[in-house]
Amino acid sequence: MDVSEAFGLTPQAASDQLVAALAASADPVLAYRASLLAGLRPQSAEATAMRSQIANSPMAQALLRVFEQDAKTRHHTYRKWQGPHWTLTCLAMIDYPPADQRLRPLVRQVHDWMFSKHFLESPLTAIYPGQADRVRHCASMDGNAIWYSVRLGLEEDRTRELVDRLIGWQWPDGGWNCDKRLEASHSSFQESLIPARGLWAYGTAHDYAPALEAAQRVADLVLQRRLLWHHSDGSLIVPEWSGKPGPDRIHYPIQFFDVLFALQVMADLGRLDDPRCADALALLEAKRLPDGGFSLEAPTTTTAAKVTSRGSYADWGPSGLRTSNPLVTLAVLDVMRHAADRPSLR
């Protein structure tokens, strides 16, 4: 008998108690996200005040250590995961308050990089003769830049250019791919979910139909595979270069393609009511722990006080299959809330 059963709690009731406890947390990041789940209106004065406190949270202050890097180190815009690009991505993930002009130089650096000659040439961008409709490019870079520019309230004139360029590079089947092999003919889920999220955020903020339509093309692409599985034989889709564990495990905080992130993107795009999300939702629900939380099954960063490959200045919480991670728990429960609000069409 697990803890929830011992106290007569259903799994959902255990999760509700956990959300209530997190809403009372001294950590502004957890308190804000949990309060939204508990019913706080995002546009309310209380929500605005709570979100403003995130700027001084331990997580935000840790991520802002990017400004302590010397100029040579910070020049590496995409450094995994402590360079300017990923710092902005992570700040957006924790709901850092918008329009903080201290971050403007980082956004400008990212845009300068993305419009540089180096960025538009091989190996970062490649176009082969006869394959102009399949630009080889890691579109997740552009997708994240669009997403956090919108989410952090730090768009530039060039943000729309990034959006239109990304749409122009969309492959015929609806996604993107950076695979340089000539025979590559299909989009990579690993490179398509992040752009979909970014384009949807921009399209929603500006009522820009081309961006919204491009994002929905990605949704159609992944839904054909029930988000995670090959439609040919039902086996799990595991991108060649993503490593293990596969996308049936929760990867966090850096997310490209896994069960949680795929469903988060479907939630953003309003597609969770599609019956083809059902298997992924069931897989995610099955991961609920006795305390109502969810674990960080596949950590994608290492907390580090100095610049380290795939390191993060921030502590993203505990990992392990039997331990609840507060940030992961709140992310999963947010997906579950969206799913409950959008009954299946079946």
Image (cartoon, rainbow, N blue to C red):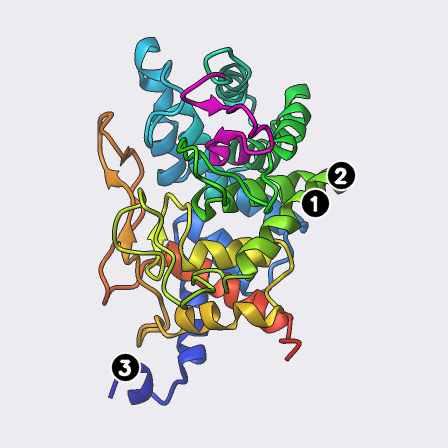
Q: Visible in this render: residue 24?
A: no
Quadrant for the C terminus, please. Answer: bottom right
Of circles 3 and 2, the one toward us is 2
On screen, residue 188 above or below 35: above
Quadrant for the N terminus, please. Answer: bottom left
Q: Start and end of the magenta stretch?
A: 121-143
SS for callout 1: helix
Q: Name the residue tied to disc 3.
A: 3
Asked if the stretch drawn in magenta spans residue 106, the answer is no
Q: Position of residue 235 (x, y in %)?
A: 36, 65
Q: Visible in this render: residue 206?
A: yes
Residue lying farthest front? 130
Marker disc for residue 208: 2
Asked if the stretch drawn in magenta spans residue 142, the answer is yes
Kind of residue at badge 3: Val
Whole-Å distance between the Cαs marked 1 and 2? 7 Å
